[in-house]
Amino acid sequence: MPLIEESDLERSVEELLRTRTPLPPVPPGTLFGAGADEPERDSRQRLPLESVLRGRKTVRAFTAAPIELGTLRHLLIRAERGYRARRLPYPDGPAPVSALVGMRRVTDVTPGLYNLAAAGGTEEFERLSHTPAPPSHWAETFTDAPAYVFIGGPVATTAGGTYGALLTHAGALGLAVWHAARAYGLDCCAYGAADFRLGQIMRSRDPAMRHMFTVVIGHPPETGPADWRLG
């Protein structure tokens, strides 16, 4: 199973979730590879908070319309700020979760897997040179959409008493992405199942990392019922 060490399958998830250890707050500038403490001010008009919360739903089918690169960058920076503001506990050492961004239909960018990295005082997308999970794989595994946020955590080095906290972090970051996307008039759906190809990519960057959670982002269709299930 991608969420636990392959050589330690006898360790049950139930045991990992049995205890929780209170830990210090997350430091700034640790998600999406971004290092700036505060994102630049975005002049784009955003939805008010009440509209964001009242309109929140899971959308499983998106239109073919692309997402603007600038919009995606701003909403991810906004999501990081929202996640950090919650000050959830985490273990000493590296940040407990990080994320890669999959782009399929995003303006002015080549489809592929990206990291949002600090460069020249601002955050820019940095394309990963080689990945075993092409954009077509994301559409088949999740759903066809313009953008994907793949959240991972250091599962292989997380002690049993803090595994529950790690899952909480992954979910909190996913929720922050969802709220930020809604603020820009976009919608999302979440998938709790891990993908082994994405896990391979994350392990190649850090041996302890595993893919844990995915948030898919796109433009909702004009009409159609909402789907409230979690993938």
Image (spheres, helix red, strand yellow):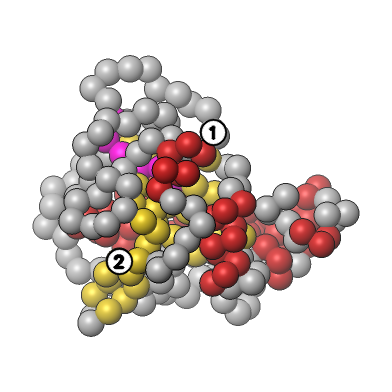
Q: Which residue is drawn at 17% across and 65% down?
A: 41
Q: Badge 2 is on which residue?
A: 125
Closest to the observer, 23 or 221: 221
The three-letter amino acid code for the residue at tag 1 is Leu
Residue 37 image offset from top left, x and y in percent: 33, 75
Q: In this view, does 126 lie to the left or right of 88?
A: left
Closest to the observer, 9 or 160: 9
Q: Residue at x 83, y 54 (%)?
A: 9
Closest to the observer, 222 or 50: 222
Task: State which region is magenta.
Answer: 215-220
Q: In this view, does 166 lie to the left or right of 145?
A: right
Residue 90 badge: none
Marks 1/2: CA–CA distance: 28 Å
The three-letter amino acid code for the residue at tag 2 is Phe
| Prevailing secondary structure class for the magenta stretch in the rendered image | strand
**Residue 6: quarter of image:** bottom right
How many neighbours does mark 1 have within 10 angstroms: few (below 14), some (14-19), or many (20 or more)? few
Q: Up-down: is 7 above or below 106?
A: below
